[in-house]
């Protein structure tokens, strides 16, 4: 078995936490794991990408263009930016909640229409799954739990090789004790939001 996940978003969304949860869960399942991350401007809201490769014959932490089995997009534009990492067979999980770049927030540029972005992705693949992770996280208690929502949603992706219970267990080990209940609820709500 070999499975590659590309996790993309912007700094502060929990992309690195998600990669650690998935990577740790994969190792506990007995799989060989290789990971890499690029987060140069992450603290300033810049692009963040993590590659997670799972499998017995995995050596390099990097995957060739088009080789991803799953792209987890924490932010809509970042999801579109990295579509080339997958193919028409790649499963794509996209959070619909945007993080506005500084030029958009200042009113100098416009953020693309979300439904337009979704429509563009759908012209390339039938494997797009969308959810508003932040809205779901707010229903769970706090917006900060959007990454737990996304991890829960990943557990429901068809063909994802790691068990839901293990992902949740590792997530709850990685978050502060005061936020375990929130993250547990957000995880379950993310899982339940998937078709």
Image (cartoon, rainbow, N blue to C red):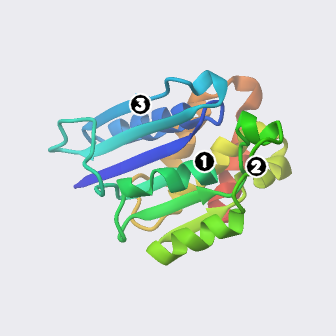
| Residue 15 in the figure: left or right of residue 113 | left
Q: Position of residue 166 (x, y in %)?
A: 48, 45
Near-viewer residue (88 or 182): 88
Q: Which residue is mark 2?
A: 134
Q: Which residue is mark 3?
A: 37
Which of the marked residues, 1 or 2, is nearer the chain's N terminus? 1
The residue that appears at 66% across and 56% down in the rendered structure is 190
Front position among marks 2 and 3 = 3
Task: Tell me which corner region of the image, top left, top right, bottom left or bottom right, holds residue 11.
Answer: top right
Q: State if disc 3 and disc 2 touch (CB < 8 Å).
A: no
Q: Which residue is mark 1?
A: 74
Task: Give how far apart the Cα atoms at labels 2 and 3 are.
Answer: 23 Å
Tag 3: Cα neighbours inside 10 Å, few (<14), some, or many (≥20)? some
Assign a secondary structure to mark 1. loop
Task: Give how far apart the Cα atoms at labels 1 and 2 are.
Answer: 10 Å
Near-viewer residue (90 or 185): 90
**Above or below: residue 110 compared with residue 101:** below
* Quadrant housing the N terminus: bottom left
Count of marks, rendered view: 3
Which of the marked residues, 1 or 3, is nearer the chain's N terminus? 3
Tag 2: Cα neighbours inside 10 Å, few (<14), some, or many (≥20)? many
**Above or below: residue 45 compared with residue 97:** above
Question: Which residue is outermost to the front?
Answer: 108
The residue that appears at 76% across and 49% down in the rendered structure is 134
Residue 16 can be seen, yes or no = yes
Assign a secondary structure to mark 3. strand
Near-viewer residue (146 or 183): 146
């Amino acid at each position: 078995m070999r499975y590659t996940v590309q996790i993309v978003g912007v700094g502060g969304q929990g992309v690195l936490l998600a990669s650690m949860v998935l990577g740790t869960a994969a190792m506990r399942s007995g799989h060989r794991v290789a990971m890499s991350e690029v987060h140069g401007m992450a603290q300033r809201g810049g692009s963040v990408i993590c590659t997670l490769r799972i499998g017995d014959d995995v050596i390099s932490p990097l995957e060739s263009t088009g080789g991803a089995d799953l792209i987890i997009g924490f932010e809509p534009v970042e999801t579109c930016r990295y579509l080339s990492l997958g193919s028409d067979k790649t499963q794509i999980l996209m959070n619909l909640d945007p993080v506005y770049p500084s030029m958009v927030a200042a009113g100098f540029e416009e953020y693309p229409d979300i439904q337009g972005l979704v429509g563009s992705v759908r012209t390339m693949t039938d494997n797009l799954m969308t959810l508003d992770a932040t809205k779901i996280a707010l229903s769970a208690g706090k917006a900060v739990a959007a990454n737990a929502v996304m991890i829960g949603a990943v557990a429901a992706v068809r063909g994802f090789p790691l068990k839901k219970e293990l992902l949740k267990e590792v997530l709850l080990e990685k978050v502060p004790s005061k936020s375990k209940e929130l993250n547990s609820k957000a995880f379950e709500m993310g899982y339940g939001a998937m078709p």
